[in-house]
Image: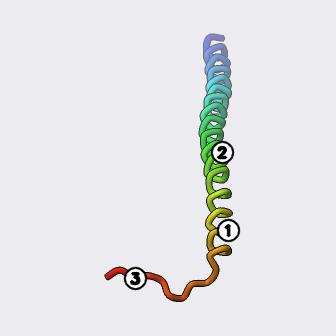
Amino acid sequence: MEVLTMRQRSMLMNILMVIGLFFVGSIILSIVLGVLGGLLWFAIKIMIPVAIAVWLVRMISGPSNNRRRYY
């Protein structure tokens, strides 16, 4: 009888450890993906206006073939 209860306790402990591992892993994954998503959002928020500004400046200034070169 004692062997049976030890096996049941071990099986229950293994199940609880797997559930705990999934729980901790989901929290860590959520934090990492949240940080990456925030950085991506911030980069897009900064880069889109900068790209539009550069495009407008190039469009307004027109093609210039005589670029200044400093040697």
Q: Indicate whether 40 appears above or below 50.
A: above
**Circle 3 sits in a helix, a strand or a loop, which is it?**
loop
Identity of the residue drawn at 40% across and 82% down = 69
Q: Position of residue 48 (x, y in %)?
A: 67, 58
Q: Indicate whether 11 appears above or below 30.
A: above
Q: Position of residue 27 (x, y in %)?
A: 64, 31
**Circle 1 sits in a helix, a strand or a loop, which is it?**
helix
Nearest to N terminus: mark 3 or mark 2: 2
- Identify the amino acid type marked 2: Gly
What mark, if any, has residue 37 been given in the picture? Answer: 2
- Looking at the picture, tell me which residue is in the foreground, 55 or 4: 55
The Cα–Cα distance between marks 1 and 2, rounded to whole angstroms, is 28 Å
What mark, if any, has residue 69 been given in the picture? Answer: 3
Q: Quadrant of the C terminus?
A: bottom left
Nearest to N terminus: mark 1 or mark 3: 1
- Looking at the picture, tell me which residue is in the foreground, 9 or 37: 37
The Cα–Cα distance between marks 1 and 3, rounded to whole angstroms, is 23 Å
Q: Residues within 10 Å of mark 1 (few under 14, many from 20)?
A: few
What mark, if any, has residue 56 been given in the picture? Answer: 1
Q: Indicate whether 41 appears above or below 31.
A: below
- Identify the amino acid type marked 1: Leu
- Looking at the picture, tell me which residue is in the foreground, 61 or 18: 61
User: Are the two marked residues, 3 and 2, in contact with CB atoms closer than 8 angstroms?
Assistant: no
**Circle 2 sits in a helix, a strand or a loop, which is it?**
helix
Identity of the residue drawn at 62% across and 25% down = 17
Q: Residues within 10 Å of mark 2 (few under 14, many from 20)?
A: few
Identity of the residue drawn at 60% across and 34% down = 28
Q: Indicate whether 22 appears above or below 64.
A: above
Q: Quadrant of the N terminus?
A: top right
Nearest to N terminus: mark 1 or mark 2: 2
